[in-house]
Image (cartoon, rainbow, N blue to C red):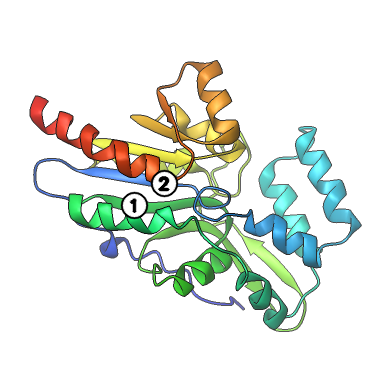
């Protein structure tokens, strides 16, 4: 049984204006959250097999979808224990200012993550941000100590064999004139060259530089807040 139904709520995206439709896709783990949520749960409740699977993924033996499926299946925890750990996960406080900017500038926000929907929604709810649409892998629990994953956004043609194909999600956004992306890691590599501009942290900076993908390096969402209004203003002047 699912822990909680995934709240996609696309109609709760911030409404764009009639002339310029903008959307910002945001990774979650390490981008919005200060810690990688999945890694944190596995550190608390995983076993030795989880570390072996992680190494196989790093070595390119398995894709992230197979890695995560088996890691979650090897997690031993009650729902109460998981919730206790999730209650300790904090978000980048500058993300709150970014959400306020999105409201003012009529920007849409979608969270696209190769992480766990229940975990993401739990953290967002604590900050009263659970109205933001979340597209992530579906975490399921038997209400004892066993867990498993479903992958509603997987794509058989995904070159990274991800649980959530971010490129597939990008292809659905045909009604938007500009698509921006905020991310930090390997799950963001595939989609980086398919958006208009990447706001990049950590590993994603090096990847964009190596692949000559347009990007702006950021430390946190305050840098996005500083840059995005000027980009929107420039777009409206030229249109």
Q: Which of 114 and 37 is in front in this view?
A: 37
Secondary structure state at the residue bearing disc 1: helix
Question: Residue 177 location, x and y as percent?
Answer: 22, 36
Above or below for 18 versus 41: above
Nearer the N terminus, badge 2 or badge 1?
1
Secondary structure state at the residue bearing disc 2: helix
Question: Residue 147 location, x and y as percent?
Answer: 72, 70
**Residue visible at 9% across and 29% down in the picture:** 237
**Residue visible at 24% across and 49% down in the picture:** 107
- 127 vs 30, left or right, is left
- The residue tagged 1 is 98
**Res 29 seen here:** yes
- The residue tagged 2 is 221
Above or below for 44 versus 221: below
Query: CB atoms at circles 2 and 1 under 8 Å apart?
Result: yes
**Res 171 seen here:** no
- 93 vs 179, left or right, is right
- 7 vs 35, left or right, is left
When asked about the image quadrant of residue 48, the answer is bottom right
**Residue visible at 53% across and 28% down in the picture:** 205
Dot 1 alpha-carbon crowd within 10 angstroms: few under 14, some 14 to 19, many 20 or more: some
Question: Residue 186 location, x and y as percent?
Answer: 61, 36
**Residue visible at 30% across and 36% down in the picture:** 227
Identify the mark at residue 116; answer none if there is no mark: none
Question: Residue 179 location, x and y as percent?
Answer: 31, 37
């Amino acid at each position: 049984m699912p822990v909680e139904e995934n709240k996609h709520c696309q109609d709760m995206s911030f409404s764009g204006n009639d002339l310029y439709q903008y959307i910002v896709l945001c990774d979650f783990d390490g981008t919005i959250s200060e810690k990688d949520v999945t890694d944190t749960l596995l550190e608390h409740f995983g076993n030795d097999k989880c570390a072996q699977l992680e190494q196989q993924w790093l070595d390119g033996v398995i894709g992230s979808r197979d890695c995560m499926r088996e890691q979650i299946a090897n997690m031993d925890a009650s729902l109460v224990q998981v919730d206790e750990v999730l209650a300790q996960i904090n978000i980048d406080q500058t993300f709150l200012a970014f959400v306020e900017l999105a409201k003012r500038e009529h920007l849409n926000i979608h969270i696209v993550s190769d992480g766990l929907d229940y975990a993401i929604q739990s953290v967002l709810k604590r900050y009263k941000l659970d109205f933001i649409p979340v597209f992530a892998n579906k975490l399921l629990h038997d209400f004892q100590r066993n867990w498993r994953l479903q992958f509603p956004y997987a794509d058989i043609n995904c070159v990274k064999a991800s649980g959530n194909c971010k490129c597939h999600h990008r292809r659905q956004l045909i009604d938007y004139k500009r698509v921006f992306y905020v991310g930090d890691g390997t799950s963001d590599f595939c989609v980086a060259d398919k958006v208009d501009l990447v706001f990049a942290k950590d590993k994603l900076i090096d990847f964009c530089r190596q692949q000559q993908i347009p990007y702006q390096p950021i430390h946190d969402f305050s840098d996005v807040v500083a840059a995005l209004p000027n980009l929107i203003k420039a777009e409206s002047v030229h249109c």
